[in-house]
Image (cartoon, rainbow, N blue to C red):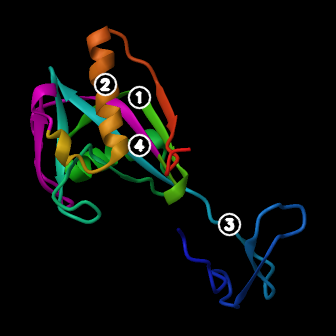
Amino acid sequence: MDPALIYCTACGTRLSHRVPEGDSLTRGICDGCGAIHYRNPRLVVGALAVWEEKVLLCRRAIEPRLGKWTLPAGFMENGETVAAAAARETLEEACARIELGAMFSHFSVPQINQVHVFYQARLLDLDYAPGIESLEVGLFSEADIPWDEIAFHTVKLSLRHYFADRARGSFALHTEDLIWPPR
C-alpha cells in the first residue's frame, strides 16, 4: 500500500490527514496553503505485439520479477495518451516499432493501486532488441510461451485471452477486477 504523504508537495508544510469538506475519504490536507493531496491509482500500459503467429515478450532486467517474462509495459507518464504510453513502453523495453490496434485487456488491481491496460499491436519489422529494462526479447508461439516464468498475472491473463480469441477467430475487449484474496 502507498505510505501516507507527510509533507505538502506545494509548500513543504506538514500535512494533516482528515476528510475534506464535501469528500468521503481521508486525504492529506495542507493547513499552510490549503492544498488537498489525492492519492490515485497508477496506470500500467503495454502492448501485445504480434509478428505472424508469434507474440513479443521481454525478460525483465529490473525488479519486480527480475528475470521473468512479460509483455512490454510500464507506467504511463503525465502528458501522454494511453496509446502513446503503450507505444513508448514497447520502444523502450524492446526497441520495437509497432502499429497499435484496439485496446485488448483492462484489469483493475486495487490491492496495489494499479490499473493495467494492454493494446493489441502489430510489429512493423523484426528490428527489435533488449532495451535498458530487458535482459532479452523474443517472439514466442503459443506452444513456446514460458508460462511458468511469466512475471505478472495480468500478462498471463492477457496472453491466455489472446490465444483463445485467436483460436475463435474473433477478438474482444477483456476487462476484469482482480481482487486478492479472491472473495
Front position among marks 4 and 3: 3
Q: What number of labels is visible?
A: 4
Q: Amino acid at mark 4?
A: Ala
Residue bounds of the magenta highlight? 116-145
The residue drawn where x is 51% and y is 45% is 182
Instruction: Report if residue 124 lies within the magenta region.
Output: yes
Mark 2 or mark 3: name the one nearer the start of the chain: 3
Mark 4 or mark 1: name the one nearer the start of the chain: 4
Local crowd size for mark 2, using a 10 Å CA cut-off: few (<14), some (14–19), many (≥20):
many
Q: Which mark, residue 162?
A: 2
Mark 2 or mark 4: name the one nearer the start of the chain: 4
Mark 1 or mark 3: name the one nearer the start of the chain: 3
Residue bearing the label numbered 4: 84
Residue bearing the label numbered 3: 38
Mark 4 or mark 3: name the one nearer the start of the chain: 3
Give the alpha-carbon distance from disc 4 to disc 1, as whole Å. 15 Å
Residue bearing the label numbered 1: 104
Q: Amino acid at mark 2?
A: Tyr
The residue drawn where x is 68% and y is 87% is 11
Is residue 71 among the parts visible in the rendering? Answer: yes
Q: Is disc 4 in contact with disc 1, using a CB cutoff of under 8 Å? A: no
